[in-house]
Amino acid sequence: MQAQDPAQIVHMLAELRVEHRDLDVAIEHMGAALGRDELQLTRMKKRKLLLKDTIARLESKLIPDLDA
């Protein structure tokens, strides 16, 4: 994931945000279910955090560097 083109970064951000939102819904449903799989739930939460970090990193690439 070494995209330097702003258009590619924006596209990847959109995809990652959708996946993050989908995981949020899935985690909510799984968390409310009886007999839930705790290991799977933990993996989904870790994936969601990884996506959040990746999204933040990509968003920072879109901010132009300013010489102070």
Image: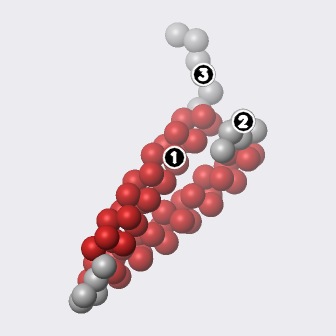
What amino acid type is highlighted by mark number 3?
Answer: Asp
Q: Which residue is mark 3?
A: 65
Of labels 1 and 2, earlier in sequence is 2
Helix, strand or loop under label 3: loop
Placement of 34 over or under 13, stated as above or below: below
Of labels 2 and 3, earlier in sequence is 2
| Circle nearer the viewer, 2 or 3 | 2
Which residue corresponds to the image point at 31% horizontal and 70% vertical from the top-left? 39
Q: Residues within 10 Å of mark 2 (few under 14, many from 20)?
A: few
What amino acid type is highlighted by mark number 2?
Answer: Gln
What amino acid type is highlighted by mark number 1?
Answer: Thr
Q: Which residue is mark 1?
A: 54
Q: Quadrant of residue 4?
A: top right
| Circle nearer the viewer, 3 or 1 | 1
- Counting from the top left corner in percent of width and height, residue 44 is at 40, 66
Which residue corresponds to the image point at 49% horizontal and 72% vertical from the top-left? 22
Q: Quadrant of residue 41?
A: bottom left
- Counting from the top left corner in percent of width and height, residue 54 is at 51, 46
Residue sitting farthest toward the top: 68
Q: Which residue is mark 2?
A: 4
Q: Residues within 10 Å of mark 1 (few under 14, many from 20)?
A: some
Q: Residues within 10 Å of mark 3 (few under 14, many from 20)?
A: few
